[in-house]
Amino acid sequence: MDGAIVRWLNDGVGAFTPWDLFMEAIVSDYLVPVAGSLVMVGMWLWGQGRERYLNQVAVIAGNTAVGVTNGLISAINAAYFRRRPFLGHDLDISLFYHPTDSSFPANSAGVGFAIATAVFVRSRRWGAALYALAALWALSRVYVGVHYPSDVLAGAALGVLVALAFAGIYRLFDPVPRVVVRVMRRLGLA
Amino acid sequence: MAAPLIADYVVWVFCAAVGVVQVAAATTGLGGLLLARTRPALCRWGGAVLVITAFAWFFATDERNLPDTAGGVDGVKQVMWFAIGAGAGVAASLLVASALNHRWALSQEPGTPDEGLGALAHDTFARLLARNLRAAVRQPSTLWRGVR
């Protein structure tokens, strides 16, 4: 089933050049992480008074969640190796390089969905935009043949769960981010 | 191969961060952070154009899908270079806006440490930082005193 979906999606590579160029940019290691991180830079400045403070706490929680998601996925990748789809199927892998590490779970989906969830907790509009971008990033990884759908689903689920957990943990241990933000406020940085 | 991609990455993030700061500052009324304080709409739209142009430039000028072993930047290094690029963009915005808005800030109510970024609605970052640091040198506990 996993392999059949990859083959079906990957059949589209080369059929329509503008779409391939778009997917080539989306699938990149840089576009979605930088877009999400820039939204967080904006969130740090956004709002007035308590609204800005809550945004800043969400940014701290989001960054922590991204780091933890990344660490968890690296640990799972090291413990369980799954071959990339292009190694077991006849796929067109001309839009992306050939990764050699484990396919499961997808780090890109984990990081993308962790950032989107962290932002969504504070801003539904920007969060929804980042969810769409993260979903497109995950889809593009399957489209170009470097991940199975189950890889990106597992990565996305992990990213969402970790981000929600950290949003909750920071609410539970509110004094920690509060002190960080308020000390930075004394320096005119928060 | 690695150096040019990292250099391009930092330039991209730097320019986009400057744009994001201008959009956010113009929208939330932080006049002390604007590069054209009397024209907030220009800052907002100019910032948005800068962000879009930076993205388009990065992806249109070269092959960016490279493995870590052939000039690509892995996740950990990407975090570091993003922090450097975005930090430099924010710092440049704070410093240049402080210089450009210095005269205006002299005629405004000075910001207080408790206001944080909110003080930039009527002050510049350089003046605010100098005031806060002077207070901290005189009495270091002011940095955390009252922080609950």
Image (cartoon, coloured by chain):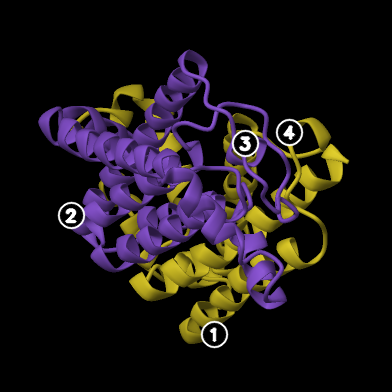
Chain colours: A purple, B yellow
Q: Nearer the viewer, residue A23 or B126?
A: A23
Q: Residue at x 68, y 76 (%)?
A: A16
Measured in 3D between alpha carbons, the distance from the residue under mark 1 to the one under mark 3, in whole angstroms, is 53 Å
Chain hosting mark 1: B
Mark number displayed over residue A101: none
Say which residue label 1 marks.
B42
| The image quarter in which residue B12 lies | bottom right
Q: Judging from the image, what secondary structure is the residue with disc 1 in? A: helix
Taking the image as drawn, is residue B122 in sight? no
The answer to which of marks 4 and 1 sits earlier in the sequence is 1
Mark number displayed over residue A50: 2
Pointer 3 local density, CA inside 10 Å: few below 14, some 14–19, many at least 20: few
Chain hosting mark 2: A
Mark number displayed over residue B68: 4
Q: Nearer the viewer, residue A120 or A42?
A: A120
Measured in 3D between alpha carbons, the distance from the residue under mark 2 to the one under mark 4, in whole angstroms, is 42 Å
Residue type indicated by callout 1: Leu
Q: Nearer the viewer, residue B99 or B11?
A: B11
In this rendering, the answer to whether A156 lies above or below A18 is above
